[in-house]
């Protein structure tokens, strides 16, 4: 075994590579060797241009400068692997792991009982096998068999607690042991004049193994790390660090972007943005993009969070029979504009969505293509044709991928994905370009359902990272570089902005191994939790050597308190012990900008030529409560888009109850005994629920309410029958043109019309069903002129030719716990006449050009759909009159 010369190098602030080159050249010359026959290994690929540039500036012959990975790849292709061997493609290896686990006794039962739990076990096996294979690659080939033998002895089978994890670990171990010859084994065959390795962030087992393998080849290890016993204490004396504590996520993102912009404004570049919190860094990247700051992102983000992934996930979601119409609309919004064969896909989708929301088609089966315009119907049929290709049973994964590709091509998404950076990476991650040949080998003989396939796709996209394209300028010239902590080492950044320096993202307890205890993992050559903590501390100490380091954290994370990172605290203690100093507060680069209030005035629209030709009770209510609401909702015909929710809402219950009671009374020829009428009510409820396509599970709370309501309603109805009341009609649609309205039509649908006994003979009673509070209804009728609805219906009925007698009106409160309540609007005919006259005068004013102001008073604004249009919250506040 060769003896390795170790040099501990104190890294100067700035560019460390000239000093590394100087020390390397001195050592080579001392041995009388030529640099061109030497190989230099650097920790990361980002160091390659830096090291090569430094050697070139030093003059003379250059050594070969590589990382262990780039060097091994340059020596030849990897050995072809067996389909069951580890490929280090997590998506493919999960298929192999499933095949390896199936022969085990309880695996089939486990898969049927808990498919998600089984997938979790598969993921754990893949992660463990990858880690074990990489650890074994750092062992010299002539010692590897001893390594596997020793490790196998430690993984003996056992029963009791942890037996399942131990079984899975043994599967992962044997899989790793059977893996192909590592590509890096070619490094052990090299015989350079000398090896030189640069160490940063702790020792690399593979590099040390290569340097010590050949006793005849001298090796030099340049250790750039601070002393491992307390690296932060060593860095504290000369670290140029300032800290900032922010209130929350958005404050930290804005403050981080502000520090970057402040550095660039002072011509301090390049700036390293440390990506400890990837979600936070996406927000910072967006803020910097607004300022058109060129960025080099070396981290990217999960491919599953991109728009391209959303298009594929949306397609698989609508292929599930449990999907709702909203799922279909979301998917079509990504595809409809470029759908092959459709010239007006966008307008067709708008028509489809508008009608679906208006009709309340919550599930795809409810969509009536006959009721759609031609373009929307063609789009819906084309969408169904594409989705139906995925509605199959068990298939091999390669067959699923071919079907998915065909579906993507059928809806036009394939062309969009192929033209997008994230889309191209997605197609590669799912192996869609080559027809699934790779997955066919990995998953031969294994079939899966649509749910299994969707989970496999989700896992593949979750494992893959989308790395945005680099700017045209070389990486070294990018003014801002987003990079992980470990890749910031030994790079000549002019400043570092380190966000996410909190207890969750820096110095936190490492996640435990999925299948191995920490001690066993260390015995098998995997990094223990302590080793991972030490490596992170060394990388943090390396970054502190750079000039102008700014640490940022937030106090609150989604409502939960968040403390400083343990490494932040250790640095603060080291500073205090060294010179009694506290970490300096970073100057806030964000400036408060004083903006003069610019309130808007209340809108006063006028549209005499646009008044509607027909008014309903709700339209009259809008005109009386707030003329601007009438203008927005009735004159301009604006309305909020209806939600298509699977969950049954109170409004759905009201619609259903109206339909049940109308059908019950329309088919009730004579009173029957209470049990018989209750039973008939329940039969009608089930039929109405089916007609309205209301889900049983979601409707269960309302069904339970109706079970209590039905006997109370029948008993109330029998008492009403005894008093001589008689049901005449329901859901009656009426129209009239009162003279004061100048040709505008009254229009309404009355829930129920009864005939009841009055003092002077029969009285026509108009009834409006309500599922709200009876107390609120009583408050409304206490002030008769404020009750628009019943007054409107009374006035409308009074103008019908058959209405020759007295008219009464009442609300019927159906949801009261103590029973059915009738809340009567007394003397409703007089209220109706006053309503017709008042609305007539108002319509005359509007025809003459009167404004329709926004009143912004009382409770009318609390739930008004037009509040965002009138900008009620931005009005000028009038000065109070003393």
Image (spheres, rainbow, N blue to C red):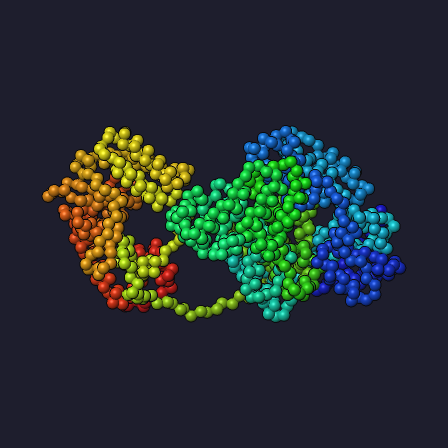
The answer to whether 250 appears left or right of 34 in the picture is left
Taking the spot 53% from the left edge, 66% from the top edge, the residue there is: 590
Look at the image and tell me whether residue 156 can be seen.
yes
Look at the image and tell me whether residue 317 can be seen.
no
Q: Position of residue 834 (x, y in %)?
A: 18, 56
Q: Residue furthest right?
A: 32
Q: Position of residue 839 (x, y in %)?
A: 22, 59
Q: Position of residue 785 (x, y in %)?
A: 21, 54
Taking the spot 65% from the left edge, 31% from the top edge, the residue there is: 103
The answer to whether 876 appears left or right of 2 in the picture is left
Taking the spot 68% from the left edge, 56% from the top edge, the residue there is: 487
Taking the spot 49% from the left edge, 41% from the top edge, the residue there is: 321
Q: Nearer the viewer, residue 174 or 58?
A: 174
The answer to whether 245 appears left or right of 733 in the picture is right
Q: Nearer the viewer, residue 584 or 128?
A: 128
Q: Nearer the viewer, residue 757 or 709?
A: 757
Q: Is residue 104 above or below residue 769?
A: above
Q: Nearer the viewer, residue 871 or 561?
A: 871
Quarter of the figure that contains the C terminus: bottom left
The answer to whether 837 appears left or right of 449 in the picture is left
């Amino acid at each position: 075994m060769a003896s390795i010369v170790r040099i501990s190098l104190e890294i100067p602030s700035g560019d460390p590579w000239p000093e590394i080159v100087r020390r390397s050249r001195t050592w080579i010359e001392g041995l009388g060797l030529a640099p061109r026959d030497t190989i230099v290994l650097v920790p990361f690929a980002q160091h390659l241009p830096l090291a090569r540039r430094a050697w070139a500036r030093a003059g003379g012959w250059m050594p070969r400068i590589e990382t262990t990975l780039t060097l091994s790849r340059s020596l030849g292709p990897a050995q072809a692997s067996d389909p069951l061997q580890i490929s280090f493609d997590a998506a493919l290896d999960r298929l192999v792991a499933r095949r390896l686990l199936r022969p085990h006794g309880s695996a089939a039962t486990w898969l049927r009982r808990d498919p998600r739990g089984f997938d979790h076990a598969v993921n754990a096996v893949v992660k463990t096998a990858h880690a074990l294979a990489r650890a074994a690659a750092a062992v010299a080939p002539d010692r590897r068999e001893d390594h596997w033998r020793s490790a196998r002895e430690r993984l003996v089978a056992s029963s009791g607690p942890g037996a399942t994890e131990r079984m899975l670990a043994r599967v992962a171990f044997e899989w790793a042991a059977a893996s192909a010859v590592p590509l890096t084994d070619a490094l052990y065959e090299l015989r350079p004049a000398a090896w030189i390795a640069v160490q940063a962030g702790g020792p690399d087992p593979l590099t040390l193994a290569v340097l010590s393998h050949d006793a005849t080849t001298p090796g030099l290890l340049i250790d750039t790390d601070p002393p491992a016993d307390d690296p932060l204490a060593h860095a504290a004396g000369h670290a140029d660090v300032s800290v900032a504590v922010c209130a929350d996520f958005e404050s930290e993102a804005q403050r981080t972007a502000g520090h970057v912009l402040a550095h660039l404004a002072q011509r301090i570049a390049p700036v390293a943005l440390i990506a400890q919190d990837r979600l936070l860094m996406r927000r910072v990247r967006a803020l910097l993009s607004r300022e058109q700051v060129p960025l080099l992102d070396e981290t990217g983000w999960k491919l599953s969070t991109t728009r391209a992934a959303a298009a594929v996930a949306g397609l698989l979601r609508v292929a599930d029979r449990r999907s709702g119409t909203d799922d279909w609309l979301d998917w079509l919004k990504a595809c409809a504009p470029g759908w092959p064969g459709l010239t007006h896909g966008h307008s067709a989708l708008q028509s489809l969505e508008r009608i679906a929301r208006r009709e309340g088609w919550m599930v795809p089966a409810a969509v009536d293509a006959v009721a759609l315009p031609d373009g929307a119907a063609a789009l819906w049929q084309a969408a169904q044709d594409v989705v139906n290709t995925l509605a199959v049973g068990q298939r091999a994964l390669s067959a699923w991928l071919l079907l998915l590709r065909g579906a993507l091509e059928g809806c036009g998404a394939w062309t969009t994905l192929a033209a997008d950076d994230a889309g191209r990476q997605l197609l590669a991650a799912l192996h869609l370009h080559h027809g699934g040949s790779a997955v066919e080998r990995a998953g031969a003989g294994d079939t899966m359902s649509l749910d299994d396939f969707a989970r496999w796709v989700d896992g593949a996209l979750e494992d893959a990272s989308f790395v945005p394209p680099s700017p045209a300028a070389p990486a070294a010239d990018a003014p801002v570089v987003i990079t992980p902590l470990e890749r910031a080492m030994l790079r000549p950044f002019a400043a570092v902005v380190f966000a996410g320096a909190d207890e969750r993202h820096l110095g936190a307890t490492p996640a435990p191994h999925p299948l191995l205890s920490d001690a066993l993992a260390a015995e098998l050559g995997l990094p223990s939790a302590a080793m991972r903590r030490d490596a992170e501390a060394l990388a943090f100490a390396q970054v502190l050597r750079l000039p102008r380091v700014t640490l940022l954290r937030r106090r609150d994370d989604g409502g939960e308190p968040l403390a400083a990172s343990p490494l932040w605290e250790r640095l603060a203690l080291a500073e205090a012990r060294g010179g009694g100093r506290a970490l300096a507060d970073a100057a806030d680069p964000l400036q408060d900008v004083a903006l003069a209030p610019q309130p808007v005035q209340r809108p006063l629209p006028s549209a005499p030529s646009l008044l509607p030709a027909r008014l309903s009770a709700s339209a009259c209510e809008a005109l009386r409560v707030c003329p601007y609401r009438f203008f927005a909702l009735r004159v301009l015909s604006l309305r909020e888009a209806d939600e298509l929710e699977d969950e049954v809402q109170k409004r759905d219950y009201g619609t259903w109850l109206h339909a049940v009671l109308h059908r019950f009374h329309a088919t009730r020829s004579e009173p029957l005994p209470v049990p018989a009428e209750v039973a008939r009510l329940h039969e009608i409820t089930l039929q109405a629920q089916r007609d309205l396509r209301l889900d049983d599970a979601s409707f269960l709370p309302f069904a339970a309410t109706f079970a209590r309501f039905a006997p109370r309603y029948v008993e109330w109805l029998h008492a009403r029958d005894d008093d001589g009341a008689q049901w005449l009609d329901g859901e009656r649609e009426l129209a009239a043109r009162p003279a004061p309205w100048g040709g505008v039509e009254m229009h309404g649908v009355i829930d129920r019309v009864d005939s009841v006994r009055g003092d002077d003979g029969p009285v026509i009673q108009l009834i409006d069903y309500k599922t709200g509070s009876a107390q609120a209804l009583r408050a409304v009728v206490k002030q008769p002129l404020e009750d628009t609805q019943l007054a409107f219906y009374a006035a409308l009925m009074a103008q019908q030719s058959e209405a020759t007698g007295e008219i009464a009106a009442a609300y019927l409160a159906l949801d009261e716990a103590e029973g059915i309540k009738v809340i009567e609007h007394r003397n409703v005919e007089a209220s109706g006449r006053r309503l017709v006259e008042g609305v007539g005068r108002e319509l005359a004013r509007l025809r003459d050009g009167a404004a329709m102001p926004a009143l912004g008073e009382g409770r009318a604004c609390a739930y008004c759909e037009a509040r965002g249009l009138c900008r009620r919250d931005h009005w000028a506040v009038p000065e109070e009159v003393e």
